[in-house]
Image: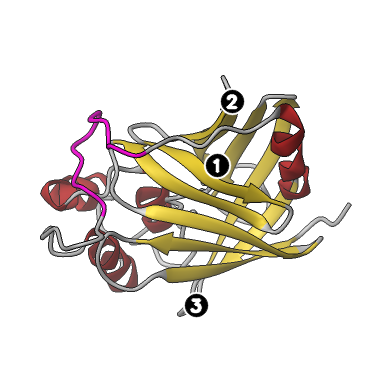
Amino acid sequence: MHTTAAGPTGVGVGIVMESPMTSGSEAWRLLRTSELDRNSNWQLVRRSHCLVPAAAFLLLLACGDGTNKSGDSPSARPGEAVGYDITRYTPKQFAILRWIEGDWRGELPKGGYFYERYRFVDDSTIAMRGFEDSTFTRPNDSAAIVFRNGSVIDRGPKAEWSASRLDDKGIDFAPIKGATNRFSWNRESPDKWTAAILPAQGNSVVYRMERVRPK
């Protein structure tokens, strides 16, 4: 909601289409961790080498047509800050996210899977790692959700999101740097949750996450 990128680390998501055209987790990784700006569409597609049609559709859906409308997120180029207020939290609230620790398989709305692992490195840092397949042996993505100075931040390679909601039901992220999309993680049970990409324009895309190695 990683979303990806979202994201959502957070956060993060990739595609496994059993096709030589894509690495398996490329599309969600781009959605989740890349700057989702209309001016970077070609950069995203070029960097992914050759996305399958479904992945390209998701990219276009997340990017929109680039026209700001009332209530839309402002546009942001890579590295640029976005004007959102940052909500403050306590270490106890950040610890609520321990439910996300473990290995997860995400399902794309039209078929295909992606794989992520979340681990608390310490009391203020969650490391996310994306993987090519269910063996969890070939990493292809990384991000971090960090608690710093009262803020909960999802940090991707070129973009950052701040938590606008955090409770025992899940977490919402709003862009603060290099992105325009929001994303959300919502817990359904100890072994299931959903990740949703919320683009500045267009409809949201929801990914169902299931624990593949229950504690």
**Looking at the picture, which amino acid does disc 3 mark?**
Gly
Image height check: is 196 above or below 124? below
Q: Position of residue 100 (x, y in %)?
A: 72, 48
The residue at 26%/52% (across/down) is 73
Where disc 1 sits, the SS reads loop
Is residue 107 rendered magenta in the image? no
Is residue 80 rendered magenta in the image? yes
The label shown at residue 9 is 1
Where disc 3 sits, the SS reads loop
Part of the protein shown in magenta: 73-84
The disc, 3 or 2, on the residue closer to the chain's N-terminal end is 3
Position of 38 with respect to 185 (left or right) is left
The disc, 2 or 1, on the residue closer to the chain's N-terminal end is 1
What main secondary structure does the magenta stretch of the protein show?
A: loop
The residue at 85%/57% (across/down) is 214
The label shown at residue 111 is 3
The label shown at residue 150 is 2
Q: Residue furthest right?
A: 215
